[in-house]
Image (spheres, grey):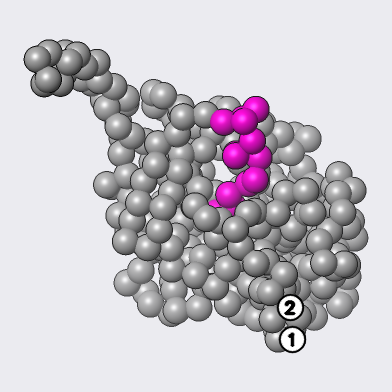
């Protein structure tokens, strides 16, 4: 663990009592317990060598899953919460961390590539250079392009929210939109306008936007969360949401698997290891 790197505090919400909140089918014939084990192992593997802590918030966990989690370097908090209340509990946990640290709110059905945190930490390290392009009006005059007007899209530079999953519907024509594209030394990132409850954010931003997070937890309303937190063309008291291209993680439902990655190969390797 490298203490000189940004601290990432993972809060991992897990419940093996329910296969899927919306009864969506799981890929590769995985039952919920096996799916959680594979996803958690992929997350834990990706964190190695970085500065992290893991808190597992167990919601009505079985004895089998408690035993599994306690094999790792985690703090296990147990209870019977339900989906909405467990989100609110993660917010309480996040508030205890230092303001300049990061928190990763992570649901238990996201599979992570081995290089996930290598790229995320690299993005965090250069976050001050991730700036939305200026608003500009230009005119072509005698083969020269003149800038008639230029202004920032913000008064205060927006901080980042990192959603590590590149959902396939972002490429459907129905949902296509203009987005800012950025790159670091490790990979490409695109602006996003929607996400789930799996994301990284600085702790001081959790505290600043606590009311929004609490309100969004009712019926797990990630649309409200995204609409309220994210700026799009301009950023006034809002944040800049980004996700990687290609994806660093995938939501383990058959209909939402992130494209361009052989997730089955990764799962098969992890099944051997667990």
Quadrant where the N terminus sits is bottom left
Residue underneath mark 1 = 272
Q: Nearer the viewer, residue 92 or 47?
A: 47
Mark 2 surroundings: few (<14), some (14-19) or many (≥20) residues within 10 A: few
Q: Nearer the viewer, mark 2 or mark 1?
A: 2
Residue found 32% across the figure and 26% down from its top: 154
Which mark is on residue 268? 2
The part of the chain drawn in magenta is: 164-176
Answer yes or no: do the residues labelled 2 and 1 have beta carbons within 8 Å? yes
Indicate whether 154 appears above or below 208: above
Quadrant where the C terminus sits is bottom right
Q: Nearer the viewer, residue 63 or 147?
A: 147
**Where residue 174 sits: x, y (%)?**
65, 27
**Where residue 18 sits: x, y (%)?**
89, 56
Indicate whether 42 appears above or below 26: below
User: Is 41 a magenta residue?
Assistant: no
Q: Is residue 103 left or right of residue 188?
A: right
Indicate whether 67 appears above or below 235: below
Mark 1 surroundings: few (<14), some (14-19) or many (≥20) residues within 10 A: few
- The quarter holding residue 268 reads bottom right
Q: Could you tell me which secondary element the residue under label 2 belongs to?
A: helix
- The answer to whether residue 133 is visible is yes
**Where residue 239 sits: x, y (%)?**
44, 35
């Amino acid at each position: 663990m490298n203490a000189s790197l940004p601290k990432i505090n993972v809060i991992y919400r897990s419940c093996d009592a329910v296969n899927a909140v919306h009864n969506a089918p799981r890929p590769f014939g995985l039952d919920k317990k096996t799916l959680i084990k594979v996803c958690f192992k992929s997350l834990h593997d990706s964190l190695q060598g970085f500065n992290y802590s893991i808190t597992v918030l167990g919601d009505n966990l079985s004895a089998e899953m408690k035993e599994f989690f306690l094999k790792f370097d985690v703090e296990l908090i147990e209870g019977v919460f339900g989906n909405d209340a467990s989100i609110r509990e993660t917010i309480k946990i996040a508030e205890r961390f230092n303001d300049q640290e990061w928190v990763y709110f992570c649901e238990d059905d996201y599979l992570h590539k081995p290089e996930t945190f290598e790229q995320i930490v690299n993005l965090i390290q250069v976050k001050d250079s991730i700036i939305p392009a200026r608003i500009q009006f230009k005119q072509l005059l005698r083969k020269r392009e003149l800038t008639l007007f230029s202004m920032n899209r913000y008064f205060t530079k927006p901080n980042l929210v990192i959603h590590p999953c590149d959902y396939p519907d972002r490429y459907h024509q129905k949902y296509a939109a203009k987005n800012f594209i950025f790159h670091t030394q490790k990979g490409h990132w695109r602006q996003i306008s929607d996400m789930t409850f799996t994301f990284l954010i600085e702790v001081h931003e959790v505290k600043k936007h606590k009311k929004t997070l609490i309100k969004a937890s009712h019926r797990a309303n990630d649309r409200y969360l995204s609409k309220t937190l994210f700026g799009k063309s301009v950023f006034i008291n809002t944040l800049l949401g980004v996700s990687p291209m290609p994806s660093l993680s995938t939501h383990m439902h058959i209909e939402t698997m992130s494209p361009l990655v052989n997730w089955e190969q990764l799962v098969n390797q992890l099944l051997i290891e667990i």
